[in-house]
Image (cartoon, helix red, strand yellow):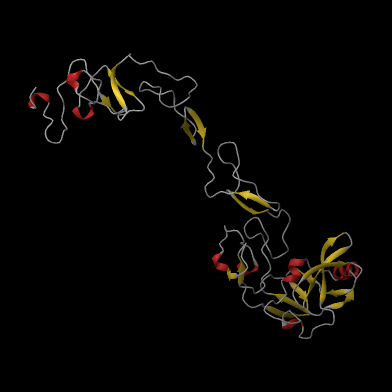
């Protein structure tokens, strides 16, 4: 047979062949072996136009070609124990319907989706991890457990979850897991470690003497007793402030007047006096245990719990009017 009668294969070896009876081969490029010798012809399953009408491309394994043309009906699909994948006859045993499912050896298998997640549902009935005590899973990340109680006056919940901390003049923040301090602006609201003192800069502390023995904090609006009262135990301290129509400050309230820019006692604004008291510790209204309560020290700005029978200083406070 001449080259022209064989469909013009040409130098490139690509061309439409004359359909050879009984072979099923259409494209010379797809044919395997010599069509005139009556051999079966190679094809690629899923690619149309490679076999004659009424023929189909049956997948094969262990050959240098992926499939052979056969007459339709010559193959019996085999889907025994399979829910997806090829049926052996060019068809399929089914497709996987789940958004995270893939076909693995004839079975639909869910692939967990935990990229960039450290907790929460993996989409396959499992979990991407659990959060440690004191934190909850929020959008796939472990975040500190939200405070469900009220915030101190002047310290609203800054993110709907946690109370805003008192301004302390601190401008550097700690990155979880690191020892060095960084500029607080590098830790954003959605990052782990957000909510430190330095995320609420207030500039210099600003207090105004409003007369009558009272001082107003211009940032929080709280009004403080300018002169501290005599030392007394915790119960007497609460009673003293209550009798004045004021109250013993909470921890956050009392910490708000600590001036952390100072390195020695007294760590409070000069409007409250410049001398360091012999005992620079003051009661808060917050219990630390059954028989102890928190106090704030104005020599180091520290907060500790101590026996309520001990005598500490008292500085009453009230909301602004």
Residue 247 seen in the current view = no
Q: Residue furthest right?
A: 309
Q: Locate the N terminus and report the quarter of the image it occupies.
A: top left
In the image, 301 versus 35, the foreground residue is: 35
Query: Could you tell me residue 48's position as x and y percent?
Result: 27, 27
Residue 216 seen in the current view = yes
Residue found at x 56% / y 48%: 117
- Please determine whether, in this image, residue 152 is positioned above or below residue 9: below
Query: Could you tell me residue 52's position as x and y percent?
Result: 23, 20
Task: Answer with the quarter of the image where residue 207 lies.
Answer: bottom right
| Left or right: 297 as drawn, with respect to 261 | right
| Left or right: 297 as drawn, with respect to 240 | left
Query: Could you tell me residue 210's position as x and y percent?
Result: 73, 79
- Please determine whether, in this image, residue 50 is positioned above or below residue 166: above
| Left or right: 306 as drawn, with respect to 39 | right
In the image, 279 versus 140, the foreground residue is: 140
| Left or right: 276 as drawn, with respect to 166 | right
Q: Locate the C terminus and report the quarter of the image it occupies.
A: bottom right
In the image, 104 versus 10, the foreground residue is: 10
Task: Answer with the quarter of the image where residue 257 lies.
Answer: bottom right
- Please determine whether, in this image, residue 309 is positioned above or below residue 76: below
Residue found at x 26% / y 25%: 42
- Please determine whether, in this image, residue 112 is positioned above or below residue 273: above
Numbered marks: total = 0
In the image, 245 versus 188, the foreground residue is: 188
Query: Could you tell me residue 141's position as x and y percent?
Result: 59, 51
Q: Residue furthest bottom?
A: 275
């Amino acid at each position: 047979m001449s080259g022209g009668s064989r469909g013009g294969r040409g130098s490139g070896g690509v061309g439409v062949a004359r359909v050879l009876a009984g072979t099923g081969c259409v494209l010379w490029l797809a044919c395997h072996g010599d069509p005139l010798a009556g051999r079966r012809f190679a094809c690629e399953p899923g690619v149309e136009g490679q076999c004659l009408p009424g023929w189909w491309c049956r997948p094969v394994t262990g050959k240098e070609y992926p499939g052979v043309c056969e007459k339709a009906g010559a193959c019996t699909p085999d889907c025994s124990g399979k829910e997806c994948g090829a049926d052996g006859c060019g068809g399929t045993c089914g497709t996987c319907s789940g958004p995270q499912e893939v076909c693995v050896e004839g079975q639909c298998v869910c692939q967990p989706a935990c990229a960039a997640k450290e907790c929460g549902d993996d989409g396959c009935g499992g979990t991407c991890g659990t959060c440690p005590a004191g934190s909850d899973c929020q959008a796939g990340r472990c975040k500190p457990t939200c405070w469900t109680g009220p915030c101190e006056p002047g310290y609203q919940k800054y993110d709907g979850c946690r109370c805003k901390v008192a301004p302390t003049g601190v401008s550097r923040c700690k990155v979880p897991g690191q020892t060095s301090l960084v500029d607080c602006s590098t830790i954003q609201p959605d990052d782990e470690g957000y909510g430190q003192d330095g995320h609420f800069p207030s500039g210099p502390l600003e207090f105004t003497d409003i007369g009558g023995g009272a001082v107003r904090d211009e940032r929080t609006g709280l009004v403080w007793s300018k002169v501290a009262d005599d030392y007394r135990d915790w119960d007497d301290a609460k009673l003293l402030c209550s009798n004045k129509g004021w109250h013993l400050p909470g921890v956050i309230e009392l910490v708000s007047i600590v001036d952390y820019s100072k390195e020695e006692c007294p760590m409070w604004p000069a409007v409250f006096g410049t001398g360091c008291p012999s005992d620079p510790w003051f009661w808060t209204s917050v219990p630390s245990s059954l028989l102890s309560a928190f106090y704030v020290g104005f020599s180091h700005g520290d907060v500790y719990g101590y026996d309520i029978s001990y005598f500490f200083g008292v500085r009453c406070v009230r909301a602004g009017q």
